[in-house]
Amino acid sequence: MAYVATRGGARAIDQAERLYRAELGQIDASRVDAVRRALPMLIDRVMGEASLYEPDLAALALAQAGGDLYEAVLLLRAWRTTQPRLAIAEPVRQEQLITHRRISAAFKDIPGGQILGPTLDYAHRLLATDVLQGRPFTPAPVTPAATAAPAYQPSLAAWQKAQGLVADPLRADVAPDAIPDLTREPLLFPAKRAHTLQSLARADTGGMLTLGYAAMRGYGNAHPTVNELRLAEAEVRVTHPRGTVFSAGRVKVSQAEVTSKGKSGQLSLGFCATLGWNEVKVISGATLDLNAAAAPKGSPVEEEFFLYHTEPVEASGFCIHFKLPHYVTFQSSLDALRGAKASAAPQSEQVPS
Amino acid sequence: MSIASLTKAWQPMSYGFLDASAKRELRRKMLKAIAVPGCQMPYASREVPMARGWGTGGLQVTLTLLKPSSVVKVIDQGADDSVNAASIRSFLSKVSGAAETWDTLAASLIQSRHRIPEERLHAGQILVLQVPNPEPLRPVEPNMSVARQMHADADYGRLWLILYEQIVRSGRIMEGAAYPSVVNGRHVMTPSPIPRWDVPKLHMAQHLTFLSAGREKRLYAVPPFTKVEPLVFSDVPFKVEDHGALTCHRSGVSGFYMNEIPQDNGGSAFELSDSHLGIKAIRKAEGEADRIGATWYRNGQLA
């Protein structure tokens, strides 16, 4: 019936929400736990877009939203924004990452070695239909390597800098609490570097892939070569009020660095990192970052274009807002159309046949 | 003295949902917006428990202004009982303890999407308009950083050009709602997608209006007694919608902005867009003591 209920809107929305939630049924701790354990990649994706590292809350948000990713991210963002910020962690350096996977497409081998780590890259994508016939899929056990890969890996860009292949801009040391924070300040352009990287880290995976892929196909100038892709864990090191620096725990992070031949006769780099393991997102994001430098205004690889349009909460919210009634504005347009038609009518009679 | 005596008890949610740091930023930006009428102030725009595009900008301003003694009215398309207005109003009262009302005269704070009530707002009332797109220059310059520079230079020539082209093509200005208007003789703003009918209500008004776009992270204001002039040519006057002669089929009231309801017989029926004005008129006709305030329009003409 009328969704712009002339009367009774409050009751209508209440019942509509009940109808949706009835479909999802009861949500309890065991459901949340099952979601968290069964879908780690999805949890990672949601935590990255929410910029909130808390697997239990991410699983709860997914359960509560029935798996609607945008709803889950909004739930987490709305929760996150009200939380006090107790401390600001120290910056994480590449060589301090506990690295599970680290590959480079730029060289056959690199200092520290190519570490494949966990990946489906070379798996045959066959659906395990046996599972539905009652035969569970049990993964084959992993045979540990004779020598374990080192937990810490050097940065490839550091080697390239030493070779003079990559520019090594002067680094300004910024105190952690002086780093601009996108969640507390508006994003303005030209964007602060910190805002750009934070915005990429929170971006919508699908949206970033779309624009990144457009750049890869040729709507960007630079063809990316994956300089270094890492899946790792980072220590969250914070300073205790007494002054001791300690690790408050570890978070999974992914980062990609892509490169191409720059105009200055050196290699240019594009970078993207996010919370959780999400390779598609960081490779796409790094490709956009790589292309942003010389991008014309309004092109899909221009920073303002891709950062505004890959914001998952803003983009999805605006998309679904078109479901709201717009009849007042529509009426105003109708008035202009009819007015123009009425004033055009006598003129059309004068047109010679 | 103990720590407990110096601190407040832990609460799962701050008063009015937003935490103190978010409200402080908003207050600062709102004061700036009043100081430079019509100029868009960027703000962080926190996520709120509603989807972007559903009034989150208006909501943040309203949440910052709310106090327990507030009386709040929320309308969408002029209707208090439209689904999203009902949702926002119940959220506002839940997190603030403010009283809810449908009556324009009784409200201290009115959050609205796409309409300004027909009854005159008075000094002391605050109107908060939800804004989907705060940038009047968007049709000529989608890039926000370039548009910001254009505002700084008062470079509005291309907006006049659009209007001129419309007159050449269609014989009249074809802008519908969200008619670009100069505020205080300096900044062009979009008054949010209110119909042209409502734009004159902002000019030299007694009340304060905030316009806030949560998704686009911009807010601006029209302070009381500030000039708001629609962009027009000296020989082509501003025209509001041709609704002055329409009559509401429910209340019998005429001379206000109407919703058109297509009928099975091919014609249209009209009803008051300001739904509570209609309710008041019906109640009054039935002999109830309901007070209808002074209206901006009288007999279909701006008073």
Image (tube, grey):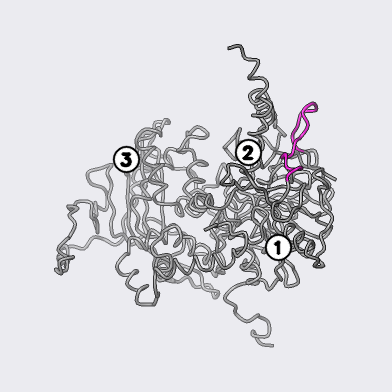
Residue mark closest to the camera, 1 vs 2: 2
Q: Which SS class for mark 1?
A: strand
The subunit letter for the residue under badge 2 reads A
Instruction: Check disc 2 and report the residue beneath it.
Output: A334
Residue denoted by label 3: A225
- Mark 1, residue position: B73
Q: Residues within 10 Å of mark 2 (few under 14, many from 20)?
A: some
In this view, A197 is above or below B189? below
* C-beta proximity under 8 Å, tags 3 and 1: no
Q: Nearer the viewer, residue A24 or A47?
A: A24
Tell me the CA gap for discs 3 and 1. 56 Å
Residue B32, above or below A50:
above
Q: Position of residue B274 (x, y in %)?
A: 71, 54
Tell me which chain the residue with mark 3 is part of: A
The segment highlighted magenta reads B230-246
| Tag 2: amino acid | Leu
- Residue A227 position (above or below residue A150): above
Tag 1: residue type?
Lys
Dot 3, how many residues are within 10 Å of its Cα: few (below 14), some (14-19), or many (20+)?
A: some
* Secondary structure beneath label 3: strand
Front position among marks 3 and 1: 1
Does the segment drawn in magenta span residue B241? yes
Q: Quadrant where the N terminus of chain B lies?
A: bottom right
* Residue occupying the point 82% across, 44% down: B302
For the residues labelled 1 and 2, the Cα–Cα distance comes to 28 Å
Q: Which residue is at the front of the view, A105 or B242?
A: B242
Most prominent secondary structure in the magenta stretch? loop
What's the amino acid at mark 3? Answer: Thr
Give residue A155's position: percent from left, percent from top. Answer: 34, 51
Callout 2–callout 3 Cβ contact below 8 Å: no
